[in-house]
Amino acid sequence: MFNTVKFLSIFAYTIGIFFFEWPFIAAFLLINIAAMFLCRLRPLAAAKYIISFLPFIFLAAFFNFILGFVQNALYLSARLILICNITQCYKKVVNTNDLCRIIETLSKPLKVFNIDGKDISLMVSISLAFIPVLRRDFEQIRTALKAKGMKVNAQNFKYIVKPFFVSILSRTNEISRAIRLKGYQ
C-alpha cells in the first residue's frame, strides 16, 4: 500500500510540475533536492542520468523556441529536468516487482471490463526486463559496424535497424513461446 501511495504521489507531483509557474518551480527544485537526499542519490549520478536525456529536452525546447515561445522553452526544459530527476529518485527506491504490484493494484477497477490486472502487470514486467536486452543488442550491432569500419550515421541506418528489429521479433517469439509453455492464457 505504501508503494502505491509513493507512486500516486510521484504521479501527482509530475503533473503538478506542469501546472505551476516560476515561483513554484523553485519549490519543486527544493523538493527534488530533498528527495535526492532522502534516497541517497549522489549529485554526479543524477547529473549523468539527466545528461542522457538532454538531447530530448533540447529538442522539445528548440521547437518551443522556433515557435516563438522563448520563456516556455526555458520553463519546459526546467520542468523536464525536474521530472527526470524525481523519476530517478523514484527508480532508486522502488524495484520492478514493486512497480508491477502497484500497477496490478491500480488496475483492479478494470475488472469491471474483464481486464485482469495481472495481465497488465505481466506486460509491464516483460517490457521493463526487455529494455536492457534491447540496449545490449543495439550496442552489439554498433560494435559490429565499427569493427567492419562503418560509421553509425543516417546513411548506415538500414544496417542498424534491420538486425535490431529481427532481434526484437525473435525475442518476442521466444517470450511468447515461453509464456504459452507455462500455460499462461
Image (spheres, rainbow, N blue to C red):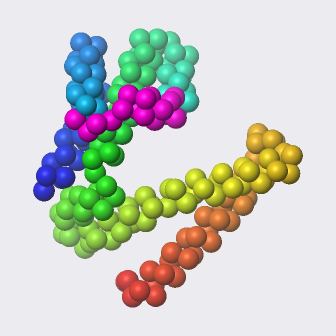
Coordinates of residue 26 in the picture (x, y in percent): 26, 16
Image mark count: 0
* Image quarter of the N terminus: bottom left
The image quarter containing residue 120 is bottom left
Coordinates of residue 134 in the picture (x, y in percent): 57, 57
Q: Residue furthest right?
A: 149
* Image quarter of the C terminus: bottom left
- The region drawn magenta spans 38-54
Is 4 displayed left or right of 14 in the figure?
Answer: left
Q: Residue at x 25, y 31 (%)?
A: 37
Q: Is residue 74 above or below residue 41?
A: above
Q: Nearer the viewer, residue 107 or 83?
A: 83
Q: Residue at x 65, y 65 (%)?
A: 167
Q: Residue at x 26, y 68 (%)?
A: 117
Please identify the dominant SS of the magenta region.
Answer: helix
Q: Is residue 162 above or below residue 52?
A: below
- Can you see residue 160? no
Q: Nearer the viewer, residue 107 or 4?
A: 4
Coordinates of residue 90 in the picture (x, y in percent): 29, 43
**Is residue 41 a member of the stretch shown in magenta?**
yes
**Is residue 80 a member of the stretch shown in magenta?**
no
The image quarter containing residue 153 is top right
Is 113 displayed left or right of 163 in the figure?
Answer: left
Q: Residue furthest left?
A: 1
